[in-house]
Amino acid sequence: MTDDLRFDEMLREDAAALPPPSDSAVNPWQTAMYQVLWGMGLTTITLNLLYLDYILPALGAVLLVLGFRTLRWENAPLGWCYKLSLAALALRGAIYVLLALPVDIGNTLAYCTALVTLALYICLWRGMVGVSRSAGA
């Protein structure tokens, strides 16, 4: 037997001897909700230092998309959250592009971003209510 085959066999034996993970250790919601909460926090932070007023909200919008992508199949409001987070990310990208151009867009896109964010928070609330009802709470 070569060293590689012997090593693979030892790994299989050791892995079979390990106990299965407890139910509390495996939680698919933990990572998704971690991303959603950090995304919500970062989209509201505005630090006018080293372009962090652009970087942090963009990173927060990406985290919202990643978090809601995992939760979109739980119920309809969380599916809407995923769609609204995609819209918010696209809207934020459009705002950044238009800010780099010499055009005057006024506050229209800021109002649209505020409406999309408010709708996202309402859908998140309704989604969490639906999840708690399905869990029997």
Image (cartoon, helix red, strand yellow):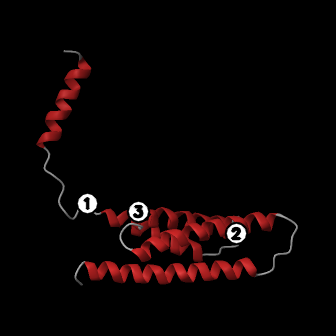
Image point (37%, 80%), residue name: 128
The answer to which of marks 2 and 1 sits earlier in the sequence is: 1
Residue 70, labelled with which disc? 3
Q: Quadrant of residue 12?
A: top left
Residue toward you, 27 or 77: 77
Residue type at the position of mark 3: Thr
- Asked which secondary structure carries label 2, the reply is loop
- Residues at marks 2 and 1, CA–CA distance in whole angstroms: 39 Å
**Position of residue 90 measured from the top left corner of the image (x, y, whole percent):** 64, 65
In the picture, the quarter occupied by the N terminus is: top left
- Asked which secondary structure carries label 3, the reply is helix
Label 1, on which residue? 26
Image point (28%, 83%), residue name: 133
Q: Work out whether 15 lies above or below 34.
A: above
How crowded is the residue under tag 1: few (<14 C-alpha within 10 Å), some, or many (20+)?
few
Residue type at the position of mark 2: Leu
